[in-house]
Amino acid sequence: MPDPGDPIAWNRFAYVYNNPVNYADPSGHVPVLLAAAYTVVDTAWDIVDVYSDIRDCFGDSDSMACAMLPIDALAVVALFAEGPSNNVARRTAKAADVGDAIPPSRALVPYDEAWAIRNTPRSDFYVRPNGDVIPATQYRYIRSDAEYLPSLRSEMSIPIQERPIYLSPIRFESGVEARHGLQIGWGSDARFRVRFDALQVADDLRVPYGKGGTAPWLEPLTKDYPEFGLGGCSQYVTNGPIYLDSYKLLPETSTAIVLYGGPYLPMSR
C-alpha cells in the first residue's frame, strides 16, 4: 500500500489515486509524478546531446555540432538552475529544450511560463471514437537542406499536401537512426526533425499502404525498402495541415545508435 494514511490508497482497485493523467506506477507500489519523471528523462537526453556535440565537433570536425554545443550545454545548465527566472540566457536554453528548438517568437515567453508548459504532461495516447488508439506525439524527419525549411521554421506548420505526409511516433536522435529505422532513402539525410501533437490530425491519421502507397497491402511497420535500413518502426500518414511544437537539426550519428542495435548505413543517394 503506497500511503496508509490516504483513504484512496485503501481502495486496491484505484490506480495511482484515480489520477492517471498526472501519475504512473510502473512497479505497482509507488505512484510517480509524471512531470518529475519526464524532467529526469529530458535531462538525460540533454546530457547525451552535449556528449554527441563534443564528439562530433572535436572528433569529426562537424561545424553544425560545434554550433549546437553551446546551446545544448546551456540547456543542461538551465535545467539545474535554482527556480524559474526571466533570464534571457535561460530562455535561450529553453529554446533548445529536450533537444528541440522553439522558434524565437515562441522562445521569448517568461521562463516560468515555459517551465510550466514543459512540465505539463501530455497523454501518451489518444483514443478515437471508434476505439482506435494513436500515439499522442508524432515526428517527421526531413532532409536538412530542403528548400522549404525557412518557411517551415517561420510558419511552424506544414500545409495540406496532395501526397501523404509520412510520420512516426518514434523519436530518433540522429539522421542515420531515422533513415535506418524508417527506411528513408532517395537522397534524404532525415536530419531535420519536427514534433507535433497528433490530436490535430487524429481524424486523418492512418496506416500507409506499402511501397510508398502503391501496394495493395498496409505497412504499419516499415519493411518494404530493406535496401535503406532494417525497418520495423511504426509509421503513419496524413495529408495535414500540421502545426508544429518544435524542431531540431539532428547530428548524422549518435551514441544512441548503440542502443538501437543497427549497423551504420551511409546516406543512400
Image (tube, grey):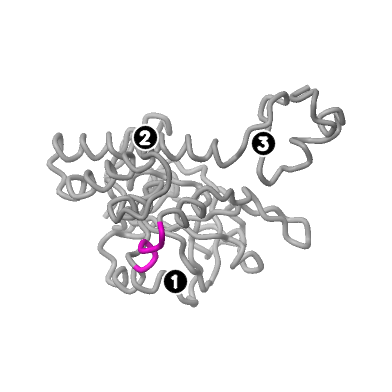
Classed neighbour count for the residue bearing mark 1: other residues with Cα under 10 Å, few (<14), some (14–19), many (≥20): some
Q: Position of residue 60 (x, y in %)?
A: 15, 38
Q: Secondary structure at mark 1?
A: strand
The CA distance from mark 1 to mark 3 is 33 Å
Report which residue position mark 2 lands on.
257
Report which residue position mark 3 lands on.
24
Q: 27 or 250, which lies in front?
A: 27
Q: Earlier in the sequence, mark 2 or mark 3?
A: 3
Q: Secondary structure at mark 3?
A: strand
Q: 122 or 213, which lies in front?
A: 122
Residue 152 in which image quadrant? bottom left
Classed neighbour count for the residue bearing mark 2: other residues with Cα under 10 Å, few (<14), some (14–19), many (≥20): some
Q: Secondary structure at mark 2?
A: helix
Residue 198 vertical placement versus 172 (above, below): below
Q: Residue at x 38, y 50 (%)?
A: 85
Circle number at residue 158 = 1
Q: Residue at x 33, y 74 (%)?
A: 151
Q: Residue at x 55, y 60 (%)?
A: 197
Magenta region includes residue 106: yes
Q: Which residues are magenta?
A: 105-110
Magenta region includes residue 118: no
Badge 2 vs badge 3, beta-carbon distance below 8 Å: no
Classed neighbour count for the residue bearing mark 3: other residues with Cα under 10 Å, few (<14), some (14–19), many (≥20): some
Judge depth for marks 1 and 2 and give the one in front. Answer: 1
Residue 223 vertical placement versus 140 (above, below): above
Dot 1 amino acid type:
Ile
Q: Is residue 190 visible?
A: no
Q: Is residue 126 left or right of residue 88?
A: right
The quarter of the image holding the C terminus is: bottom left
The CA distance from mark 2 to mark 3 is 28 Å
Q: Is residue 1 left or right of residue 56?
A: right
